[in-house]
């Protein structure tokens, strides 16, 4: 996971800088070898990791996973009877619809249908990630979006379908059979800071199908594609 990647990068740096004073408070050497301090693990989780999922169960699983990682790293630093030890851990993993914003209300849809789409306010500093967006965006975005044709949402969530097709926000969704992973890519690129990186696990069908034409054009125009691993 992303936490493990960041942890290993920090530990590699610490191993290469055994005499650096900057190591103090970041890592410790104990009987188990070099490890992050509990405070460093907390700072990575609360200051570097952000996530959005429409599924509340997925949100809770992610938060629990981060809590377990924190406890594993912090076990040697905790008092005998720690209080509020997990306070704030995973607070930046939130429930919402990554693709739908509050502007969906401008389509004149039924309010109940709008609420069903669970819009996520990215720029809101309290309920979204407004502070990150205001500073230019994310350094990196990774994900494994669902592989579902957008037209399926015409039956499952018609308000979201209208937003993707008529909201004017996604050039990658302007063809009928577009895979919903395409708008996820487009949205994620928007959330990157200048020079940021995006890495997705997606199907490769859009490279050769008719519905992928708009996505291929978008990638070419923005010079966005750097590397592909085709399994």
Image (cartoon, rainbow, N blue to C red):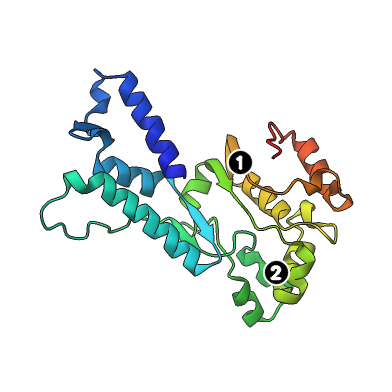
Q: Nearer the viewer, mark 1 or mark 2?
A: 1
The residue located at (79%, 52%) in the rendering is: 171
Residue at numbered disc 2: 160
Observer-nearest of 107 and 31: 31
Task: Using the rendered view, name the quadrant where residue 115 is placed.
Answer: bottom right
Task: Using the rendered view, name the quadrant where residue 189 is placed.
Answer: top right
Q: At numbered mark 2, what does the secondary structure look like: helix, strand or loop? A: helix
Using the numbered discs, state the Cα–Cα distance from disc 1 to disc 2 in whole angstroms: 25 Å
Name the spot of residue 135 as percent of width and height, x first. 50, 42
Name the spot of residue 126 as percent of width and height, x first. 44, 60
Q: At numbered mark 1, what does the secondary structure look like: helix, strand or loop? A: strand
The residue located at (61%, 40%) in the rendering is: 198
Task: Using the rendered view, name the quadrant where residue 41 is placed.
Answer: top left
**How many residues crowd mark 2 within 10 Å: few (<14), some (14–19), many (20+)?**
many
Q: Is residue 108 left or right of residue 76?
A: right
Name, please, the residue furthest toward the right: 210
Name, please, the residue furthest toward the left: 80
Q: Is residue 47 left or right of residue 210?
A: left
Q: Can residue 127 be seen by looking at this rendering?
A: no
The residue located at (30%, 49%) in the rendering is: 70
Name the spot of residue 207 as percent of width and height, x first. 81, 43
- Labelled pair 1, 2 in contact (Cβ < 8 Å): no
**Quadrant placement of the C terminus:** top right
Observer-nearest of 91 and 30: 30
Name the spot of residue 210 as percent of width and height, x first. 89, 50
Task: Return the mark for residue 53.
Answer: none
Q: Is residue 226 left or right of residue 197?
A: right
Earlier sequence position, callout 1 versus callout 2:
2
Task: Return the mark for residue 199.
Answer: 1
The residue located at (47%, 62%) in the rendering is: 59
Q: Can residue 66 be seen by looking at this rendering?
A: yes
């Amino acid at each position: 996971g992303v936490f493990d990647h960041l942890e290993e990068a920090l530990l590699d740096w610490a191993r290469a800088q055994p005499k650096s004073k900057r190591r103090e408070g970041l890592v410790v050497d104990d009987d188990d070898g070099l490890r992050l301090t509990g405070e460093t693990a907390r700072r990575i989780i609360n200051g570097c990791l952000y996530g959005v999922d429409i599924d509340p169960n997925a949100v809770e699983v992610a938060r629990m996973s981060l809590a377990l990682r924190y406890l594993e790293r912090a076990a040697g630093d905790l008092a005998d009877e720690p209080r509020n030890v997990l306070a704030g851990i995973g607070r930046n993993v939130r429930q919402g619809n990554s693709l739908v914003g509050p502007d969906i209300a401008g389509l004149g849809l039924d309010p109940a249908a709008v609420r069903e789409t669970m819009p996520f306010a990215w720029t809101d500093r309290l309920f979204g990630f407004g502070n990150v967006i205001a500073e230019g965006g994310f350094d990196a975005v990774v994900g494994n979006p669902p592989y579902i044709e957008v037209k399926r949402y015409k039956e499952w969530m018609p308000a979201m379908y209208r937003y993707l097709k008529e909201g004017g926000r996604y050039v990658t969704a302007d063809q009928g059979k577009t895979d919903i992973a395409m708008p996820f890519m487009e949205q994620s690129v928007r959330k990157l800071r200048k020079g940021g990186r995006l890495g997705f696990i997606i199907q490769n069908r859009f490279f050769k199908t008719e519905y992928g034409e708009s996505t291929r054009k978008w990638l070419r125009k923005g010079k966005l594609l750097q590397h592909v691993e085709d399994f």
